[in-house]
Image: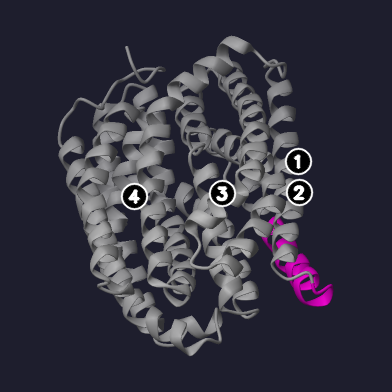
Amino acid sequence: MFAQRDVDRQIVRVAIPAFFALITEPLMLLADTAIVGHLGTPELGGLSAASVVLGTVVGLCIFLAYGSTSAVARHHGAGDERTAFGLAMSSLWLALLLGVGLGLLTAGASGLLSRALSSSDRVAGLAQDYLVISALAVPAMLLILAATGAMRGVLDLRTPLIATIAANLLNVCLALLFVYGFDWGIRGAASATVVAQWFAAVWLVVVVVRRARVVNASARPRIAEILDSGRQGVPLIVRTITLRASLVLGTLVAARLGDVPLAANQVAAAIVTFLAFGLDAIAIAGQTLTGRTLGAGDAAGTRDLTRRMIVWGISTGLVAAIVLAVSAPWLPQLFTSDRAVQDALVPALLVVAVIQPLSGIVFVLDGVLIGAGDGAYLAKAGLVVLVAYAPLVLFVGWTDAGFTWLWVAYGAFIAARLVTLWLRQRSDAWMVLGATSRP
């Protein structure tokens, strides 16, 4: 019983600050959705199309956070702070290089992407407006990922928490001012996001650089480490592509169904993202603590952590399910004044509520395996799941089954992920001990 309580304390010590830090990012999206949503249904549809593109671009680089967390945590657990922060600095340089390139690519392809994901020409124009401006924030978003991952690796959850909360508050204030005060519309929401993201990025990068200097880790770009970080991130990129592809497919189908389903999809996706990031707090504990225990050579401790985190995942998923089910009838009113969009959302949100306990387990096991550096398996499993999910969601669009069935298909996607992750955690193949995740 004592050991179990000790494990719970470790999880809580990481998960609680991680929870508040994590939800600030989807809260920013929820705030933008609510502010833009009351401008009109086309504006909400435009935000839906643009958010999928922007989320995919940034999501493909989530390995900057996950890889940084697991690598830094392993060296931190082994007592090698200089190497830990040297890897952190390499991650920052990689984030900056990728951010500049992807930001330019996003702006350049904004027109084509907006038209592909929109339900009408007006929606496409609004989506492009948002994308062109938001592309300026891509380097900042990637720097935030890398810096936050590094600080999680050394169990500093407080700094990212404070920085992201401040950025979120700044975003809301500026969005209200730009959208309604200056009458900039959807461009105002994008401009507020750019300012807020760079505010948080500069804050976090300065903190990491200062700590690197304290342990005499070089702040200069080291090409070999940057290339190695990129190479190790390839499996996680593949994994993320499979996850983002599912969301892109959902948006394409929603756009085919019309303006109202596309607008409703933005609200539903924003709420799901918020819940996912909230549940992901336990997964962050999984990444950080798994990296530390494996780095310290503690296989038994890793197993104990995994078992308890599964229990935590189920519990938090049940709480999320109950809260969403109770609030589903009135929650859509916060985001849109269009009754048709509201009516489409209620049954879809009830489906999402049913999925949450499964999602809680999925996110926990995903975090554990990422913390263990098991990216190659996650990439293969992601491809298998996508192959199973794609026909389901495309069938919804082909048959015009309706918006609710789009989220039923998403439930099948989560269930398929659970099967692949559960089978993996039952084996010992992912439990590689020592300061490196592979022999």
Q: Check disc 1 and give the amino acid type.
A: Val
Q: Residues within 10 Å of mark 4 (few under 14, many from 20)?
A: many
Q: Is 171 a magenta residue?
A: yes
Marks 3 and 4, how far apart at CA? 33 Å
Point out which mark residue 199 bears.
2
Q: Are marks 2 and 1 in contact (CB under 8 Å)?
A: yes
Q: Are marks 2 and 4 in contact (CB under 8 Å)?
A: no
Residue designated by label 1:
202
Tell me the SS state at disc 4. Answer: helix
Q: Are marks 3 and 1 in contact (CB under 8 Å)?
A: no
Q: Main secondary structure of the magenta part?
A: helix
Q: Check disc 3 and give the amino acid type.
A: Leu
Which residue is at a point 27% across and 45% down the rendered structure image? Answer: 386
Is any part of residue 133 visible from this angle?
yes
Image coords of residue 136 (percent x, y): 72, 45
Image coords of residue 33 (percent x, y): 58, 70
Tell me the SS state at disc 2. Answer: helix
**Left or right of 430: which side holds 129?**
right
Which residue is at a point 34% across and 62% down the rendered structure image? Answer: 316
Q: Check disc 2 and give the amino acid type.
A: Phe
